[in-house]
C-alpha cells in the first residue's frame, strides 16, 4: 500500500518529450520530464494512491467512467509504459466528467465503501476519499485549453 497518486496538466505539445523519456532504461527520466513539461495539481494528494484507486472503483460502480483518451499518438505510449497512468482526459473529457462529480457523496458513505472494499477499518477513510475526490476535481478543472490533458498516475 505504498502507492502514490500524482496528477499533472500537460500541453499536448509536450507529450512527445514524455514519450521519448520512456525510452530510457528506467522511469526516472520520465518523471523528471513530467515535472518540467507539465503543471502538477496542487496541493498534492496527502493520502496513499490505494485510497484513490478505491475511489475510482466506487465511481465506476456509479457509472462514472474515468477516460483514457490515448488515441492520439504518442499518448498511447504513456498507457503502455509502466508508469501507472489511470486517467488521461482531454478538455472535453474533463468538462463531461466534472458534471457527475459536482455532487459528492457523504463522508460516511465514502468511509463505509472504502472499509467494505478493503476489508479494513480505517477511521479516516471518508476524509481520505473526499480529499481524493477534491484532488481529481481540481485537476480536471485545471484543464483550461483544448490542447491540454489531465494525467493521473497511481504508482
Image (tube, rainbow, N blue to C red):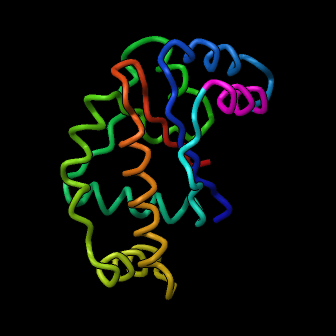
Per the rendered image, the range of residues in magenta is 28-37
Camera-nearest residue between 150 and 66: 150
93 on left or right of 35: left
- Where residue 97 sits in the image (x, y, percent)? 25, 44
Q: Is the residue 55 above or below the residue 153 in the image?
A: below
Locate the N terminus by quadrant: bottom right
Q: With 15 as the anchor, is 53 left or right in this view?
A: left
Q: Looking at this view, is 73 or 25 the one in front?
A: 73
Left/right of residue 139 with respect to residue 101 in the rendered view: right
Compared to residue 108, the image places residue 4 above or below, namely above
Residue 44 position (above or below residue 117): above
Secondary structure, magenta segment, majority class: helix
How far from the left and from the top, in percent, is residue 79? Answer: 50, 29
Residue 21, percent from left and from top: 70, 19
Q: Residue at x 58, y 12 (%)?
A: 16
Q: Is residue 87 left or right of residue 20?
A: left
Q: Is residue 42 magenta?
A: no
Query: Residue placed at 25% from the left, 55% from the top?
Result: 101
Pick the residue in front: 127 or 141: 141
Amino acid at each position: 500500500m505504498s502507492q502514490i497518486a500524482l496528477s499533472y496538466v500537460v500541453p499536448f505539445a509536450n507529450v512527445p518529450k514524455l514519450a521519448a523519456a520512456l525510452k530510457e532504461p528506467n522511469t526516472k527520466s520520465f518523471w523528471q520530464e513530467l515535472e518540467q513539461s507539465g503543471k502538477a495539481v496542487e496541493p498534492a494528494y496527502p493520502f496513499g494512491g490505494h485510497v484513490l484507486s478505491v475511489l475510482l472503483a466506487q465511481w465506476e460502480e456509479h457509472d462514472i467512467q474515468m477516460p483514457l483518451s490515448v488515441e492520439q499518438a504518442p499518448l498511447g505510449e504513456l498507457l503502455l509504459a509502466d508508469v501507472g497512468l489511470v486517467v488521461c482526459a482531454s478538455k472535453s473529457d474533463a468538462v463531461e466528467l466534472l458534471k457527475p462529480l459536482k455532487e459528492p457523496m457523504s463522508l460516511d458513505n465514502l468511509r463505509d465503501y472504502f472499509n467494505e472494499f478493503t476489508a479494513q477499518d480505517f477511521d479516516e477513510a471518508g476524509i481520505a476519499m473526499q480529499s481524493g475526490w477534491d484532488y481529481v476535481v481540481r485537476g480536471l478543472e485545471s484543464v483550461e485549453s483544448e490542447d491540454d490533458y489531465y494525467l493521473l498516475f497511481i504508482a
